[in-house]
Image (spheres, grey):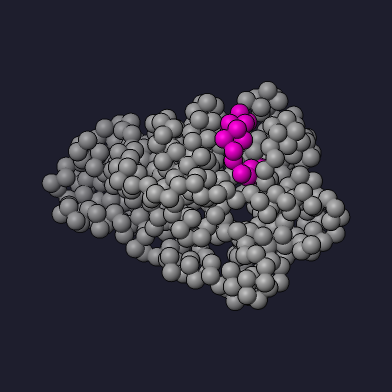
Amino acid sequence: MRSGLFIQTGIRGVERDQALKIISSMLPSSIVLFRGDFSNETELQELIKDIQKLYAIEKSTVPPVFAIDQEGGNVVRIPWLDYNPSNYFLGQVNNEKLTNYVGLVTGSDLYRLGIRWNLAPVLDILNNYNQVLLERSFGEDVETVAINGAAYISGLQNQGVAATAKHFPGHGGVLEDSHQTLPRDKRTMNALLNDAFPFRAAIMAGVRTVMLSHVLYEELDADNPATLSQKAYDLLRKTFQFNGLVITDSVDMKAVSRNYSTPEIVSKTVGLGADLVECADLQTSVELSDSIRGIDSDKLKKKVERISSFLPEKKVNFRPPREVLQSFSIISSKVHKQIYIDPDKHFYVVLLDSIAESQVAEEYSTAGALTRSLKENYFDFTLMDATAFRGFHLYGTQMIIVGRNEHLKDRVSSITEKCVQNRCVFISTSISKDIGIIPENVGYIAAYSSKPENILGAIYRAMKFF
């Protein structure tokens, strides 16, 4: 029994040729793809085909299941596909037919590309405005999250793509980022179970996989985060009666990697209730694979059965019409403070967070898409990034400033300074958590996402077109 069967690995950390050699040797059962692994659809398809050949031709075994985090909103790995404005927006609309349709659209696109596993949806309740969650959550209301989560799962899986309910039993009760540290949830067991209700709904809806969080829940297990806790696995398996595939969040995240050795991680994940351990870093996955060899094979038999049978059948053949999703993306923004921009006069569009877009080809970036759309309609505008904005000294003009989480950054003084003698509108690509620190004379629109159509719709709303 090969140890790689119990690993979902990324290919980060090594050059492409070396990555293929390692994969050929380890043969993980699943490979999770990230935005930095490809720049366009041709590169993505070539990568998938190269890996499939390794398994089918060189090793004469079943190819891996390709997985991805295509949540929508601000978490998308394939930006040229159409995707939902954000889970938070869907929760605000709270129309399960629309949310089901979004799942169908995403599933249709991923299935066509050969990606059969989407590590979505997020079912965490937005309790404390955790900076990692925000617009990734369907909202603050447990029933709203449960209804929309189940609807999305149904749509996705009807297209033959497995869904993942994450991050069990709920990441929303902490403020810390588990990518950086180990969060501790100190709430009562009743509060934890209340937040876990959407996972019950997901299980009832037939979700194929559940991902555990790297949060330590003191009332559940005072010593280990959920991913490394037998009590958490028992809660999921015995209390919630989930019989599908269980996967950890990526164990190279600092919540786990800083506090546990590789043998400890393996013994407390695959050695306990996890079927697959996820690790985005390929070299660390090799270490995990080496440790898994020490586990008694009798303990792994049921895991093998779940790993080999978790993919759903494709039940629909139609391609969901794109007009619906595109229309909702355009109108998804919400005005909190109205300041109008005159569309007949010159204005500046400032993208404070545009640097991150360097991971993908320019034609798919927010900047490129916005420029094309605004030029097509003959608007007189200038696009500006954060660096140019810091050196901006003109007055008496119009500015549309686009950013996320200003309450967590030190840019507000610059925004205040620039907007004293200019007409300004701030567009948040998240929820309106930072509205209290945006200057009173600045308009505020929540777009819920950095998706170009969301920002464009917010710009049109600032122009009073709707």
Residue toward you, 410 or 290: 290
Provide residue 117's location: percent of width, then percent of height: 56, 52
Q: Position of residue 250 (x, y in %)?
A: 65, 52
Relative to 183, 419 lies left or right:
left
The picture places residue 40, in percent across and down from the top left corner, at 42, 66
The count of marks equals 0
Which of the 4 image quarters holds residue 208? Answer: top right
Per the image, is 210 magenta? yes
Residue that appears at 65% across and 25% down:
191
Seen in the image, is 243 located left or right of residue 295? Answer: left
Q: Does the image show residue 343?
A: yes
Q: Residue at x 40, y 36 (%)?
A: 98
Magenta-colored span: 196-213
Q: Residue at x 13, y 46 (%)?
A: 344
* Most foreground residue, 91 or 370: 91
Magenta span contains residue 351: no
What x and y, as percent, mark residue 379? 17, 52
Question: Which corner quadrant holds the N terminus?
Answer: bottom right
Q: Is residue 177 left or right of residue 420?
A: right
Residue at far left of view: 344
Which quarter of the image is occupied by the C terminus? top left
Q: Residue at x 35, y 55 (%)?
A: 366
Q: Is residue 390 visible?
A: no
Camera-side residue of 277 and 14? 277
